[in-house]
Image: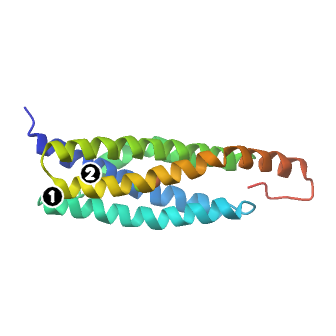
Amino acid sequence: MTDPRDHLLSWLRDVHAAEEQAIKMLSSFARRIENYPELKARIEQHVTETQRQSERVRECLRRHGSDASTLKDTGTKLMGLGQGLSGIFTSDEIIKGVLASYTFEQMEIASYKILVAAARRLGDAETARVCEEILQEELAMAGWLESRFGELTGKFFDLEADESVTAKH
Ligand code: MG
Ligand code: FE
């Protein structure tokens, strides 16, 4: 039987890898956005939050005498999702990017909910508290995106129809 603590540490490493992936993915997405300043600003804000999240998860690992060094392998596992954003140069890249970002947030939300439950069960109150706080930021980001689906889609069609606008993202 695997020590339950090892599961907690491995899930923390997985989520750390996801955060590192998110930093790259969201930064490159934000850089490409030209016509959606509100979306760009919210994503940039979440990049800053994500950098802090990554540090905080690393601190949780450190408290257990562990580190995030084995994250190379788990990082590649999550690449599939990340690629939803990295190679997009299609005319609807803004919609594809929003979809991929939202999907990524949902994955993070589930991950942190599981981590809160695991940390509580193992009596690691500090990790539970940290993961609960990060969870709130992920919920806020997902909620923000979700509340703008209609507006963003409408603007996307407006820009598509406007022949004077060359960059549609
Ligand atoms: Mg995150
Ligand atoms: Fe996030």
Residue 66, labelled with which disc? 1
Residue 27: x and y, percent?
54, 62
Residue 153 can be seen in this image: yes
Q: Observer-nearest residue: 14 or 122?
A: 122
| Outermost top residue | 1
Q: Earlier in the sequence, mark 2 or mark 1?
A: 2
Vertical position of residue 46 compared to residue 144: above or below: below
Give residue 111's position: percent from left, percent from top: 34, 43
Q: Is residue 87 visible?
A: no
Tell me which residue sits at (16%, 42%) in the image: 121
Quadrant where the N terminus lies? top left
Q: Is mark 1 within 8 Å of ligand 1?
A: no
Q: Which residue is at a point 54% across and 45% down the rendered structure image?
A: 102
- Marks 2 and 1 sit apart, C-alpha to C-alpha, by 10 Å
Relative to 143, 62 lies left or right? left
Q: Residues within 10 Å of mark 1 (few under 14, many from 20)?
A: some
- The structure residue drawn at horizontal position 14% and vertical position 62%, both measured from the top left corner, is 63
Q: Mark 1 falls on what kind of element? A: loop
C-beta proximity under 8 Å, tags 2 and 1? yes
Q: Residue at x 20, y 58 (%)?
A: 126
- Location of the C terminus (image quadrant): bottom right
Badge 2, how many Cα within 10 Å: few under 14, some, many 20+?
A: many
> Would residue 8 appear left or right of 161 to someone viewing this image?
left
Q: Give x and y (percent) for residue 159.
A: 84, 52
Please provide percent x and percent y for residue 85: 57, 49
Residue type at tag 2? Arg
Which label number is shown at residue 13? 2
Give the mark count.
2
What type is the residue that disc 1 sits on?
A: Ser
Q: Secondary structure at mark 2?
A: helix
Scheme of image coloration: rainbow
The residue closer to the viewer here, 33 or 42, is 42
